[in-house]
Amino acid sequence: MHQCDYNSRNGPSPRCIHPNMTGRLGVASFAAAAILWASYTDFTSAQRKIDSIQGGQLRPGTKVTLSYPELTAWTKEKVPDGVRNPQIRVNTPGIVTGSALIDFAKVQKAQGHEPGWLMAKLLSGERPVSVTAKVRSSGGTATVDVQRVEISGMSIDGGTLDFLIRNVLLPMYPNAVVGRPFELGDRIERLDVQPAGVIVAIGK
């Protein structure tokens, strides 16, 4: 039988915790620490690669591969308020699916835009969002064509999708380019989107 010291302010002492429970807590703490450490190292690895690309010191023909764990960890550090748990995956070359929990009204407010009455009613509250897009890239440019959007499991396409792009995406991100080529910059020749990662090819 275990002795147990109890204090009304601090609760039971560590001696009150059953050894099996202590073991489970230890394993859970170790697993949580391992996950946090993996996320941190993925972020620092991604940032180091991005810094090398933006630094302009890489030789022409160099290829830098950013894995999806790296990109996901980097994205988690960069998303605005209102976006949580972003994930990136690629099962087919050139086709990217990104998902996250998004409160559109909160994101708009964080970007300095007060959502209108209709947007506040339609898009307030945190919702699971998934976006699938085709990425084409060559000659220092890339084109992103949105193929499918799901909000709370409901597929959004056609005129409704165009409406969301015009009234939600573009007001929040005026520099976003959808459906037409845009310059990659930083001497990037092309982006090769593969299931193993995004390959950044450096040009002259």
Image: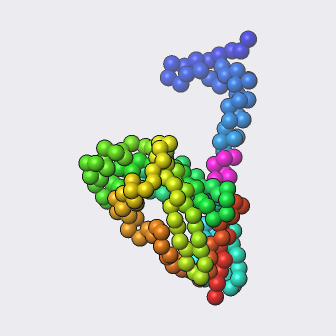
Determine if the magenta segment contains residue 39: yes
Quarter in which the C terminus is drawn? bottom right
In the image, 172: left or right of 66?
left
Residue pictured at 59% horizontal, 71% vertical = 136
Residue 105 pos. (x, y %): 35, 50
Residue nearer the viewer, 155 or 48 = 155
Residue 23 pos. (x, y %): 73, 29
Residue 69 picture quarter: bottom right
Is 89 located above or below residue 27 in the figure? below
Residue 141 pos. (x, y %): 55, 78
Q: Residue furthest toward the left? A: 117
Residue 53 pos. (x, y %): 62, 76
Residue range in magenta is: 34-43
Residue pictured at 70% horizontal, 34% vertical = 26
Report whether residue 168 is seen: no
Taken as a whole, is the magenta stretch helix, strand or loop?
Answer: helix
